[in-house]
Amino acid sequence: MLEDDAAMDADSLVGQDPTSGARPSGGERDWAAAVLKPVRWMRMLCRELGATFVAGVVLVYGLSQGFAGSFFRVASDYYWKDVQRLQPATVQFLSVFFFIPWVLKPLWGIMTDVFPVCGYRRRPYFLFSGILGTVSAAIVAITVGLPVSSAVLCLVGISTAVAIADVTIDACIAKNSIDKPALAPDMQSLCAFSSSLGALVGYATSGMFVHHLGAQGALGVMAIAPATVVFLGFFIYELKARQHNVKEKVLNKVSGAVKGMVRTIRYPVVWKPSLYMFLSLALSISTHEGQFYWYTNKTPPNPGFSQEFVGLVHAIGAVASMLGVVVYHKWLKDYPFRSILLYAQLLYGVSGLLDLTFVLRWNLALGVPDAAFVTLEECVSRVVGRVRLMPMMVLSTRLCPPGMEGTFFALLMCIDSLGALAAKAGGAAALRALRVTRTDFGRLWLAVLLRNVLRLATLAAIGLVPAAGQTDVLLVPSELGLVLVSSPASVADDEDEERLQLAMLTSHTDDDDV
């Protein structure tokens, strides 16, 4: 209530009559309006979508994905390089395993939707994911001489914890996108901004922690995010589901979900854009590990960046990513899917030439220092990457059929994860084929060039993307023959479940029976 009152006071301040005696000057009013505009936007989202939904998005995307994901990227890179002392192609290959939990998102979605534990469908999975992530991070941080296989298993455990926590909020986003399609771009803006802000904090602190605690010790900080998910599992407000005919209902729902996914994905309006999104991710092979080993190598003429500088550059990139969110939200969310993805993919391929310029050291010939150039490259790639990703996320939410939003959105995210996995595997194969090692980077530029060519080649498939607007209805169940059959009891149960509040942390906790 205090926050609402404060926001109402702020709104009334912005809307004051400029002719009033005690009113601020025109310049002050403009400044106040600009500062308070994000507050009013958040209030609008809370009013239209629910404050607990907004809080859940900020917590999961901001802390679990944004902070933990960015911190994991820097700390794990140094862990493989300095602690395990592996070759870049090997690390690139091992990173494939970290995408497996995301490929399994449909499984997590089905489990959380149709397999309640003690009558609860959300709390047990939040608890499980939080405990799994906390224990995994603790093991890899405190165990000296951990074998590579065990280290991979622990890091996969961390990734699994994030993936399971992510499934629930994704289902809510997909359903709200269908119920209120006009707000679908705004929801993706909220997700992206929360993720970018969390990433900013993670990147800004990762280099410092790696420097002072070492790469292995820094990974222990990863336990913070899943620990908050444990807290959420205890205090989230959730209605207890009725337990009659549980086994029969579970089997019916699983069968219906699988049949619905298969039936829906077969329609051209669904599989064509899904195929494009897969190709867009898969063909952009990842050369990250090779570039990381190169620019942290201390032997001249390699740049030899420090841990703190690497974290700082990524933090600046996170700010640029938030700028990309603003660019999309302000100017691009009303463009048709095909138009925005065409130009975004073109810019994505062209911006990759900055990496090629850096690896070939042409920036020095142009008189641009390494630090300035790599910062510029990071900012450009983050803005372009965010502008490219957000319409694909909106498109994914628009392809989900009513009644199975969570499961089908998880399937689409599984397809995207398969694309990212293919990109990692392709990058590992390229680095190995070109014999890029810990000390030999002579052919690294060829791998980067191949990546850029494949990015531009994706444009040949742009016809798979619908030309519809981002708020248009793409999937009409009656036209596709999708009929969702449910008994009255199951419909009532589903309606109860839809009333679940994801993050009711300030109210209802006194009535919890946990």
Image: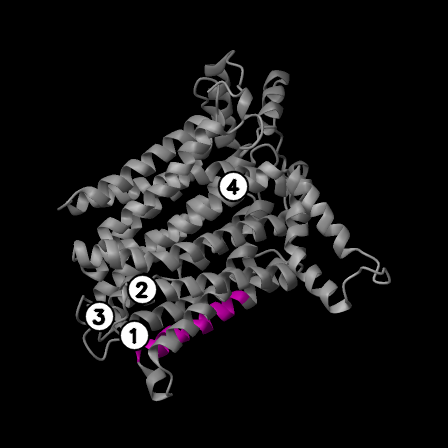
Q: Which residue is mark 4?
A: 409
Magenta span: chief secondary structure: helix
Q: Amino acid at mark 2?
A: Glu
Residue 50 quadrant: top right
Relative side of 128 to 473, left or right: left
- Mark 3 and mark 2: span between their CA atoms? 14 Å
Which span is picked out in magenta?
344-360
Q: SS for tag 3? A: loop
Look at 54% across and 64% down and name the residue there.
323
Vertical side of 435 occupied by 420: above or below? above
**Residue 445 disc label:** 1
Q: Amino acid at mark 1?
A: Trp
Relative side of 264 to 373, left or right: right
Q: Nearer the viewer, mark 2 or mark 4?
A: 2
224 falls in the magenta region: no
**Residue 84 disc label:** none
- Mark 2 and mark 1: span between their CA atoms? 25 Å
Q: Residues within 10 Å of mark 2 (few under 14, many from 20)?
A: some
Q: Which residue is mark 3?
A: 297
- Mark 3 and mark 1: span between their CA atoms? 16 Å
Q: Which residue occupies the foreground of this view, 201 or 135?
A: 201
